[in-house]
Amino acid sequence: MLNAFAAWLLHTPVTAFLETAAWAVPTIQTLHILCIAIVFGGAVFINLRVFGLIERDQPVVAVLDRFLPPMAIAIVVLAVTGALLIASEPNRAMFRVVFWIKMGLVLLALAGTWTQRRLILVGAARDEGATTLGVRLFAGVTLLLWVGVIFAGRWIGYATGWPGSPT
Amino acid sequence: MSLTDALTALQALPLSTAIAESDWIFPTIESLHVIAITLVVGSIIVVDLRLIGVAARTRPLAAFTAQFLPITWCAFALAALTGGLMFLAKPVSYAGNIFFLAKLLLLLAAGLNMAAFHLFVERPAHQGRADGAARLSGLASLTIWIGVVALGRWIGFTI
Amino acid sequence: MRRQTAALILALSAACALPLAAEAHHSFAMYDQTRTVTLKGAIKTVLWSNPHVVIWLEGAPITGGAPSVWTIELTSPGNLTRIGWTRTSLKPGDAVELQILPLRDGQQGGAFKTAKLLATGQVLDANWVQKSQIAAHP
């Protein structure tokens, strides 16, 4: 079924454009990386605040509320650029297990990133600046999930396709 | 010994061969490089947006430079280390790659811009006296670093 | 404020436009996957390195043309060794026929499909999915 979808993609105008305009794929990749900087950077800065290492004069929730909105926009752009990158070579990424691992990690990391706000708010009712061990663990694990996403993303290029894959 | 000789010797080192041929070493170094450059760019974006004046204008500039620039430096060190290791995989090839050379030039420009900022702009800017220069510095920084990322991608597009 | 944002957007666009002048021949999108070109000649150099093994061939298409240097891209060393290649499966001086997916922009290069060693008749492919029966090249 995936083979049929990839075969269909191969003949769409979007793919044709991406294949013929030499600048398209590198530009999309650059945008993808810049958005990773926003999402991953944001996740690291949130963690640094959760662990009390930076911006201790700011309430934790304030730091979150500063970084989460641009991260949300960046995630949307990542999804769009990611889809375009798949469209540019339909017979590759979708047929590697590590690609689907990356997708799973993205979903988990997204869930973690947006859930920690509620967790922190609960703690904030008592003390705006500090965080509980539970919150710290949660933030730390979420960050590790984002690290996993980056590693999985790089590994797509080094993986071989599963049996029946077009390339 | 010419530069080409030196680079060829570099390529023949056991470490270089391991990086060039191993199944997992190169992608690991690449992933760490991605993490490093995203932290460089991410922290620089935070400071530059404040410098340019599009974000958090009510908070003092010093709050941002003091807290985020150390992150930039640490991340840059990791980026330079991982970049150097990847260079070892095919030094002769990269040394002749115009995008790699352009990227090095842009990194130099980034360094010069940062030096100029620290020397001439930072203190007056903290006192709110150098809005124009601060804006220019921030804009230049953002442009240069986006260029660095773009050139880095294009290295991978040339053989 | 609005002028600043406009200036910012302009600067960012300029930065993204930076490498526009270049030629890209990576990302499989740059190869024409609907046709194959067969080249005949001798291996000039093999770069057995991450992220992509590269072969330079001194030769010409079997349909005709003056000999010149063609740049052929393969997958990573790890992917190749996993299907039975070694770093000396193809060596400088080997007389070969190479099947490639040609570059769309007409430059002399492409993505590797198969190689036939003319001395032994052995065929090497980079079918990255199925394990090929490739004996070590003596």
Image (cartoon, rainbow, N blue to C red):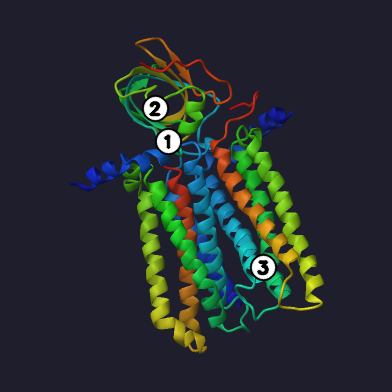
Give the residue type that dot 3 points to.
Phe
Drawn side of residue A41 relative to residue A117, left or right: left
Tell me what residue is drawn at x 55 percent, y 67 percent.
B43
How many residues crowd around disc 2 within 10 Å: few (fewer than 14), some, or many (20 or more)?
some
Across and down, in percent, residue C45 comes to: 32, 29
Drawn side of residue C94 relative to residue B26, left or right: left
Secondary structure at numbered mark 3: helix
Disc number for residue B62: none
Disc number for residue B21: 1
Which chain is home to disc 3? A
Which chain is home to disc 2? C
How many residues crowd around disc 1 within 10 Å: few (fewer than 14), some, or many (20 or more)?
many
Drawn side of residue B26 relative to residue A151, left or right: left
Q: What whole-number distance in Å separates the C-alpha atoms at marks 2 and 1?
A: 9 Å
Residues marked 2 and 1 touching at CB (< 8 Å): yes
Residue under label 3, please give it: A67
Residue under label 2, please give it: C87
Tell me what residue is drawn at x 50 percent, y 84 percent.
B131
Across and down, in percent, residue A117 comes to: 76, 66
Instruction: Answer whether residue A12 is visible to the viewer in this image.
Output: no
Give the residue type that dot 2 points to.
Arg
Q: What whole-number distance in Å separates the C-alpha atoms at marks 3 and 1?
A: 40 Å
Farthest front residue? Answer: A133
Across and down, in percent, residue B123 comes to: 45, 86
Farthest left residue? Answer: B1
